[in-house]
Image (cartoon, rainbow, N blue to C red):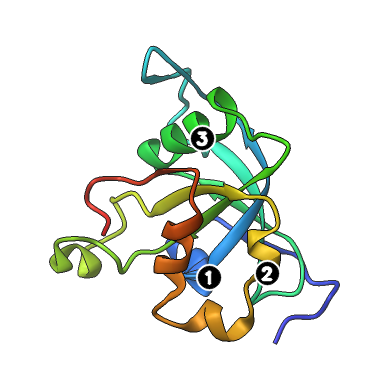
């Protein structure tokens, strides 16, 4: 489906939807215009994404660059990857989804809602998952069994 040389950049919900519900390993997180201070997002330019994130997903054979455009998603990523920082034996896994809200009506409304769940787990977890386990309903259970820490908006299941 994707060539090895193709580069994918995700900005809009439509673009991000190619990995909707997939577990993705975070390679890098780069704030662009903002930062978090005393629990509040500061230094924001409303025309520029808050951050870029480089991720790897089993579904796509190369790294992907995504732009974080929701304030709460940025704040949670900041807490997980800048304030907390990953230990040498940890990795960050994200799931981007616009179809996992507690109130199912939100799944059909325009994309004003946060979409990223972040989990810190032992290093190597992502590599150990098989394609079969990746696609099963057991994926979230398996992740919750090994998680070290996690961040998710309250409106997401």
Q: Which is more N-terminal, label 2 or label 1?
A: 1
Task: Estimate the x, y position of residue 96 in percent, counting from the top left.
Answer: 45, 60
Pointer 1: what residue? 19
Residue at the far front in the pictured view: 145
Instruction: Give the secondary structure at mark 3.
Output: helix
Q: Which is more N-terminal, label 3 or label 1?
A: 1
Callout in the foreground (1, 3): 3
Instruction: Give the secondary structure at mark 1.
Output: helix
**Residue under the point 42% across and 52% down:** 116
Residue at the far top in the pictured view: 38
Say if mark 1 contacts mark 2, CB within 8 Å. Answer: no
Pointer 2: what residue? 128
Q: Give the image quarter of residue 63.
A: bottom right
Task: Estimate the x, y position of residue 60 in percent, counting from the top left.
Answer: 68, 74
**148 in relation to 21, above or below:** above
How busy is the neighbourhood of tag 3: few (under 14 within 10 Å), some, or many (20 plus)?
some
| Residue 12 visible from this viewpoint | no
Callout in the foreground (1, 2): 2
Q: Separation of disc 1 and disc 3 at Cα?
A: 21 Å
Q: Separation of disc 1 and disc 2 at Cα?
A: 19 Å
In this view, the residue in front, 53 or 136, is 136
Side of 43 relative to 153 (left or right): right
Task: Estimate the x, y position of residue 110 in percent, counting from the top left.
Answer: 26, 61
**96 in relation to 132, above or below:** above
Callout in the foreground (3, 2): 2
Pointer 3: what residue? 80
| Residue 118 visible from this viewpoint | yes
Say if mark 1 contacts mark 3, CB within 8 Å. Answer: no
Q: Give the image quarter of residue 25.
A: bottom right
**Residue under the point 14% across and 67% down:** 105
**Residue under the point 50% across and 38% down:** 77
**3 in relation to 65, above or below:** below
């Amino acid at each position: 489906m994707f060539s090895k040389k193709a580069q994918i950049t995700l900005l809009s919900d439509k673009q991000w939807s190619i990995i909707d519900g997939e577990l993705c390993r975070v390679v890098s997180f780069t704030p662009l215009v903002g930062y978090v201070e005393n629990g509040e997002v500061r230094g924001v330019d409303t025309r520029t994404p808050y951050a870029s994130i480089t991720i790897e997903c089993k579904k796509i054979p190369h790294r992907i660059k995504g732009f974080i455009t929701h304030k709460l998603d940025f704040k949670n990523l900041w807490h997980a990857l800048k304030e907390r920082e990953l230990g040498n034996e940890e990795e960050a896994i994200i799931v981007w989804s616009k179809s996992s809200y507690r109130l199912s009506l939100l799944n059909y409304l325009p994309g004003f809602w946060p979409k990223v769940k972040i989990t810190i787990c032992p290093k190597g977890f992502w590599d150990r998952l098989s394609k079969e386990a990746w696609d099963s309903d057991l994926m979230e259970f398996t992740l919750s069994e090994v998680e070290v820490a996690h961040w998710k908006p309250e409106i997401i299941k």
